[in-house]
């Protein structure tokens, strides 16, 4: 069946009753309101696209939908009836299947074993391998991929084929709603086209699909209606794909619902002197290559781009946490040894990592120890820590940064996101950095604390620190940085002063040039 | 230790850990009460008081011992016997506490101990020692311990072999080498002075017991008061965060295994002195006893939190248990059964506490 007729079908079905209605969904995490009143309705047989910037709440929403998270407020109606979804199994029983970005297959099992994982076919405890295999073959055929053998080990398959297996698994249950979270991220052009054929086949059978993608061209190609999320709330829902111009979508995605206060640029960056941080031709395997970067004392350079574009990898490689395959990193004219964090720290570099909890902090340890961990030598004589000095320095810094609640003996894990970030910043403040790399400095940080963190970053720069900020939030990069580099698919595609760019231009640069 | 301390100390364990005995104000302010009582409470929360549960267990065990075995248990001589037996496994357990706190495990401690004991009692070593000084034997044992620890550490850190496997391999190889060197024969110590040193009495207590106390005190200071200890906790608690904070995680891991090796060597010397023999069968299953003592002491097997005081109590509890059983002529099998039960109960209690804390 052709795409055109599908489109017509769904158009005529336009008034059909939604299979899923979510209304006023609220989900709070400590310190953040990830979802703040989201509405979504999905009709049978349509491809409903979910659009929004990173951090807009798309992932949280689908986790609520698949019952991985419990919403704090709001109602979910399924086929007209209000339902509660206490466990992922309950969502699955209704017919909701979710395929996450990170495929959750077991590499050491066969295709058929993966498809029936959790609901294995067995009689008297003995696996009915033959039945499972033949039913898997039927499913793969239905998905248009009969060439995938049911008895192959999943680890030997390409990412695209693995995705098909994931879909087969979803369809091995009675699936009425399929959620696809950025399925095209791991696929090349032809594979994406195959995926679309599969999706068309499913919608023709009446299956509803919620499709998440950053690629506007894909949405144009496959989508029926669009819901746009921004800052955890629905800003537009049920927009027909064919009638909504791209500029309108970008406006909806970026349209400011919360005003952040960015500190004034002092504008006294002296670019005539040698840069503090100089990166030349830096590359890391197939992740990114040819990255040049210069940051002067007092300057804030922002790296904008999508998740997976290679921004985090770039700063981690600059920091030596990943071993570069080519290129050099120089701090104050001194070339750093590749792949050595110790060398980078010794040269005056500091990193506030993206995953604060797993990469940045010792959650069970007190605040003071987390602040002093990178400057322990200062408090030690022959290896013995002078804990009084250590504590008073930690107290001085946390008070300066207004970490709340007070008291440096508290375990850092009990602080809110914003205060945890301040602890990481205090660590490098204490150390006295020349170069500070900040990866998503305001992720999971509430609105109030954001402004404080922005001001803090600017004041560090004013003291002569060279700062690199990675952020998925375009307005953050534009508001905070002096100079912006746009990263797409492992390459720097644009570089200019922040004042010469606006949000839609950056989004354009970030998303354009994708093969649909 | 008074029993009211039990619940109080458990509730406030985390802040108390951070504060230490000198600066307890911040952590105790929440618990309220007068200044004097909070100060007393904070003292209980740290060190011995934090391990009140273990103290109670040990006291109970002593009461049982005194009732069932009477004066044979409750005598100075018997107390010294318990301490002497506890010393060897105790020194090993102190080292094990460090490795486990640092996120690793060492299954090869018993084998390293055996190899050290054999190598320091070979004919060649003893001949040289007789000509010079018994300290040569100690030097050989320490070198063996350091060498084995270095191999373990380098394999784990730089070879990226899982600690369980790397030290399992060392367990097999070191004991094998010990058997080859000794030809599976028990080697008698002939060097005068060696045994005399370790079994000499100082203030009525044998030197080897003092040595255990010394190792424990040094272990406590290093874990709680030095950069090395702080790094150990960081590396065990969150290796990635430690690495990104600029700590050389690999080098530190190697040092941790070397440290255990040294502890094994010291334990080997103590055991050689006590038995006047070096043997490839020394230290059999010490790895299990040491891990058990560390775990019931309250050190997290997943790393990031360790307690030397807890380990010392863990060792004392197991040794006293053995002693009470032996005095009552109960079989080793019964001991093992009860040991297993104690480990399970201790760990279940720990998990309860951990869950309660995280759900707060």
Image (cartoon, coloured by chain):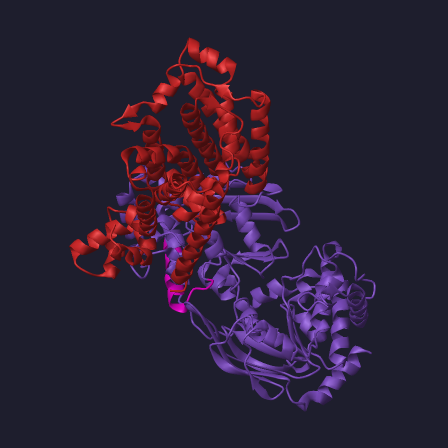
Chain colours: A purple, B red
Report the residue that reaches farthest toward the bottom: A15
Q: Can you give x and y, in whole percent of width and height, for residue A224 in the image? A: 68, 80
Q: Is residue B267 visible?
A: yes
The residue range painted magenta reads A443-459
Count of residue discs: 0
- The one nearer the camera, B204 or A209, is B204
Q: Which residue is nearer to you in this view: A197 or B28?
A: B28
Q: Quadrant of the C terminus of chain A?
A: bottom right
Name the residue located 60 percent from the left edge and 66 percent from the top edge. Answer: A508
Residue A72 on image: x %, y %: 46, 77
In the image shown, does B86 or A263 lie closer to the viewer? B86
In the rendered structure, the answer to whether residue B17 lies left or right of residue A497 reads left
Q: As drawn, which residue projects farthest toward the top?
A: B131
Is A445 a magenta residue?
yes
Report whether residue A515 is seen. no
B224 above or below A413? above
């Amino acid at each position: 069946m052709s795409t055109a007729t599908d489109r017509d079908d769904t158009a005529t079905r336009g008034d059909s009753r939604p299979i899923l209605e979510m209304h006023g969904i609220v989900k709070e995490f400590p310190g953040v309101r990830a979802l703040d009143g989201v509405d979504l309705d999905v009709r049978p047989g349509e491809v409903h696209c979910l659009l929004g910037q990173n951090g807009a709440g798309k992932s949280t929403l689908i986790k609520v939908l698949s019952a991985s998270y419990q919403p704090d407020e709001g109602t979910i109606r399924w086929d007209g009836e209000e339902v509660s979804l206490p466990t992922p199994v309950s969502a699955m029983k209704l017919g909701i299947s979710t395929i996450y970005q990170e495929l959750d297959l077991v590499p050491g099992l066969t295709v058929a074993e993966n498809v029936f994982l959790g609901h294995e076919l067995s009689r008297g405890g003995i696996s009915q391998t033959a039945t499972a295999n033949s039913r898997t073959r039927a499913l793969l055929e239905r998905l248009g991929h009969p060439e995938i053998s049911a008895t192959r080990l999943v680890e030997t398959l390409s990412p695209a084929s693995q995705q098909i297996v994931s879909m087969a698994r979803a369809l091995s249950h009675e699936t009425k709603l399929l959620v696809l979270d950025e399925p095209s991220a791991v696929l090349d052009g032809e594979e994406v086209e195959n995926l679309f054929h599969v999706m068309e086949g499913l919608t023709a059978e009446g299956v509803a699909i919620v499709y998440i993608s950053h690629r506007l061209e894909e949405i144009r190609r496959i989508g029926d209606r669009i819901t746009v999320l921004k800052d955890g709330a629905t800003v537009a829902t049920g927009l027909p794909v064919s009638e909504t111009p791209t500029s309108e979508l970008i406006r909806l995605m970026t349209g400011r619902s919360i005003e952040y206060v960015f500190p004034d640029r002092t504008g006294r960056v002296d670019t005539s002197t040698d840069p503090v941080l100089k990166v030349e031709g830096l590359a890391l395997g197939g992740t990114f290559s040819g990255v040049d970067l210069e940051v002067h004392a007092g300057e804030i350079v922002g790296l904008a781009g999508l998740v997976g574009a290679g921004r985090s990898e770039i700063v981690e490689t600059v920091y030596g946490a990943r071993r570069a395959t080519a290129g050099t990193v120089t701090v104050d004219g001194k070339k750093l040894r590749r792949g050595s964090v110790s060398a980078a720290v010794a040269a005056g570099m500091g990193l506030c990592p993206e995953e604060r909890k797993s990469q940045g902090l010792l959650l069970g340890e007190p605040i003071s120890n987390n602040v002093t961990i990178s400057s322990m030598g200062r408090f030690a004589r022959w290896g013995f820590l002078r804990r009084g000095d250590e504590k008073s320095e930690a107290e001085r810094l946390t008070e300066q940064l207004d970490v709340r609640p007070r008291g440096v003996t508290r375990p850092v894990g009990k602080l809110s996101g914003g205060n945890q970030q301040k602890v990481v910043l205090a660590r490098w403040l204490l150390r006295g950095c020349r170069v500070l790399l900040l990866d998503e400095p305001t992720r999971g940080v509430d609105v109030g604390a954001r402004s404080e963190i922005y001001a803090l970053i600017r004041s560090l720069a004013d003291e002569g620190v060279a700062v690199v900020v990675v952020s998925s939030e375009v307005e953050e990069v534009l508001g905070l940085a002096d100079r912006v580099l746009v990263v797409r698919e492992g390459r720097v595609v644009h570089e200019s002063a922040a004042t010469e760019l606006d949000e839609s231009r950056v989004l354009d640069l970030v998303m354009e040039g994708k093969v649909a | 230790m008074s029993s009211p301390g039990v619940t109080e100390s458990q509730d406030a364990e985390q802040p108390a850990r951070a504060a230490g005995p000198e600066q307890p104000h911040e952590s105790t302010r929440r618990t309220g009460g007068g200044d004097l009582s909070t100060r007393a409470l904070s003292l209980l929360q740290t060190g011995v008081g934090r391990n009140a549960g273990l103290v109670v267990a040990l006291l109970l065990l002593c009461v049982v011992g005194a009732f069932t075995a009477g004066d044979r248990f409750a005598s100075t001589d018997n107390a010294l016997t318990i301490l002497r037996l506890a010393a060897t496994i105790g020194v090993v357990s102190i080292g094990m506490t460090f490795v486990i706190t640092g996120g690793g495990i060492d299954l090869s401690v018993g084998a390293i101990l055996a190899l050290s004991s054999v190598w320091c009692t070979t004919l060649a070593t003893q001949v040289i020692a007789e000509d010079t000084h018994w300290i040569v034997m100690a030097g050989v044992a320490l070198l063996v311990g350091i060498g084995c620890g270095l191999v373990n550490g380098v394999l784990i850190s730089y070879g990226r072999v899982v600690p369980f496997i790397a030290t399992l391999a060392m367990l097999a190889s070191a004991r094998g080498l010990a058997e080859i060197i000794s030809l599976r024969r028990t080697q008698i110590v002939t060097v005068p002075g060696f045994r005399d040193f370790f079994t000499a009495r100082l203030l009525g207590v044998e030197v080897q017991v003092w040595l255990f106390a010394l190792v424990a005190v040094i272990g406590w200071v290093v874990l709680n008061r030095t950069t090395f200890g702080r790094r150990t906790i960081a590396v065990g608690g969150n290796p990635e965060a430690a690495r990104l904070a600029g700590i050389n995680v690999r080098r530190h891991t190697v040092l941790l295994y070397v440290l255990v090796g040294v502890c094994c060597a010291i334990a080997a010397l103590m055991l050689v002195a006590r038995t006047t023999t070096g043997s490839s069968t020394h230290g059999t299953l010490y790895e299990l006893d040491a891990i058990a003592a560390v775990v019931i002491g309250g050190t997290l097997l997943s790393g990031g939190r360790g307690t030397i005081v807890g380990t010392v109590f863990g060792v004392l509890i197991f040794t006293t248990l053995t002693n009470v059983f032996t005095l009552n002529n109960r079989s080793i099998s019964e001991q093992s059964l009860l040991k297993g039960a104690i480990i399970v109960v201790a760990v279940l209690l720990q998990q309860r506490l951990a869950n309660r804390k995280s759900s707060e």
